[in-house]
Amino acid sequence: MSDKRIIKIFDTTLRDGEQSPGASMNLEEKLKVAQALIDLGVDIIEAGFPIASPGDFEAVRSIASTFSGATICGLARCAEADIDRAWEALQDNPDPRIHVFLATSAIHRQFKLKMTPDEIVDRSVAGVRRAASYGADVEFSPEDAARTEIDFLCRVVEAVIDAGATTVNIPDTVGYATPAHMGGVIHSLMNRVPNIDKAVISIHCHNDLGLAVANSLAAVQAGAGQIECTINGIGERAGNCALEEVVMAMRTRGDFYSCDTRINSRKLVPTSQLISSITGMHVQRNKAIVGKNAFAHEAGIHQDGMLKERTTYEIMRPEDVGLEKTDLVLGKHSGRAALADRALTLGYHLNHDQIKIVFEQFKKLADEKKEVYDGDIVALIERELFGTTNQEWSLVDYQLISECGGPQKIDIALRRGEEEVKGSAESRKGPVEAAFNAIREALSLEMECVEFDAKSMSGGEDASVDMTFQINHKGEIYRGRGISLNMVEAAIIAIVNAANRAILHERVVTSGTGAAQTRSTI
C-alpha cells in the first residue's frame, strides 16, 4: 500500500447528487448523510451551494459547525456575493474549502455568459483571490472543461493556480468525454501548465454516455489526484461518477492503477442503502458493487465453480463492500451442487438419491418462480422426502369455483395407492372451510377443525405458503402441514396430512402395536 498513490475522494452527494429530480433532502437527512460520509472515509464533503437558498445555507453551516474529520466544502460562482455567503456558512469548520466555478467552453462563453476569453480569465482569478483572502482552501472548476479548447483551458488553469487555487477540478459537465479524450486533457494540463505541481488536479465526470467511471479512471491514469463522485452515482440527468464503483475499481485493480483511496469499503453497501432510503432512488439489481445481484450467482456452472473456489467467478469479496456473503441464488439455471450446498446450510444432509428427487421438483418450482428462497427449499425437502407414502392419502386434483359474495364450491380428488376418492362441498365462509368439508366427505372421517395458521415462507408476491392445520378426531388432536405456492392447495395438503395421521393412529391403536412410537410423531 505504501508505494501506491492515494487519490482523494471528493463526495458531492449533498450538492450535485441532491440536484437529481426528487432527491432533495431536509436538514436532518443531510446531517445523517454527512455523518455516513465521514464514517465512510471521504476526504472532502461538498455540503451544498450556500447562496442557492436559505435551506442550502443552513445545511452547509450546520454540517460545517458539526463535523470534523473531512474537509467541508461549499460551492460558489465567481461572484463576490456567492463567495462571501459560502465563507459565512463554512467559517466555523476547522478545514473549510470554497469551491468556485466559472464556465470556460466556447458554447458557454457565447450563449450563457456572453463574455470574452480575457473576461473569463479575469473573473476566474478575481473569484479565486477573494475566496483565498478568507484563508480557506480554494478549489476552482472551469465548467464544461471537457469541451473547452485545450489552449484556453491551460491558460485558465495556470492563472487560477497563480491566484491561489490549491485544487483545480476538470469537469465533464455534460458527460461528453470519452476515456481517451479525458486522459488526453489531463495529460496536456500536466505537461503544458508550468505551475501544475502547485495544485491537485481533480476530475468531475457526468454519466450521460455511461462513461463517468471510465473517464475518471482515465484521468487518474493521466495524473489526476482527486475524484469527484456521488454515492450510487446520483446527480443531474444520468448522474455522476459512482463513488463505490471508482473506489473498488482502483482497489481491485491496484496492480494496474497503482493507487488507492482512504475509503472504508466495508461501509459502501450500508451508505448506499442509506442514500437510497433517504432519496427514494433505489439502485437497479445489477448495479455494480452495491446492487442486489452484484454478488449473486444463479447459473449452475458459476455456482459449481464458486463452491469449489470463490475466485473462479468473483473478483471482489462481498465482505469487503459491506455485504455478509455471496448469494447463490437458486433459480431455473441452478445446478445440483448449489441445491445440495443450500440444503446442507439449512440442516439437511441429503444423499445422492435424495438430491436427485428434490432436484427434479426444484426445477419445476424454479420454472414457476423467479427466485427460489430458503423457505421453498425446506418445503420441497419436507414434501418430497418426508411427506406422504403409498399408505397415505395424497391430493390428486381439485377444482375451486369462487364467486364474490357467493358460495365457494370445491371438488377434491384424493388417492392412496390404487384407491381414489372424491369429495365436494361449498361454504360461504371461504375456500378453506369448503376444502375441509370436502376432505371430510371424501374420507368419511369424523373430524373437526381446531385451528389453522398460514404464513409466507419467503419474500415476494410469489412466496410459498406454509399452512398448518390442527384437527380433532375422536378426542385426539392431530396436526398437518402443507406448503404450496397456492394458499388453497397448501390448506388441502395440510388437512390431508392431519387426516393421514389420525387414520394411521387409529389403525395402530386397533392393531394394538406401536402406539407409543406413533404418538411421538403427532
Image (tube, grey):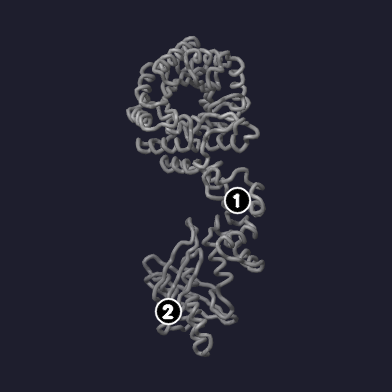
Name the residue nearer the viewer: 416 or 379: 379
Q: Residue at x 45, y 74 (%)?
A: 435
Report the residue at 49% width, 88% height from top: 509
**Residue toward you, 521 or 185:** 521
Question: Vertically, is 30 above or below 201?
Answer: below
Whether the residues at callouts 2 and 1 have beta carbons within 8 Å, the answer is no
271 lies above or below 496:
above
Instruction: Please identify the quarter of the rendering in which residue 148 is found.
Output: top right
Residue 241 at x, y = what percent?
53, 32
Question: Helix or strand or loop: what does disc 1 sit on?
Answer: strand
* Image-quadrant location for residue 15: top left
Circle 1 residue:
297
Give the residue furthest to the top. Answer: 118
User: Number of callouts in the render?
Assistant: 2
Q: Which mark is residue 313?
A: none
Q: Residue at x 47, y 31 (%)?
A: 11
> Alpha carbon of mark 2 to alpha carbon of mark 1: how far?
44 Å
Q: Indicate the amino acid at tag 1.
A: His
Q: Is residue 181 visible?
A: no
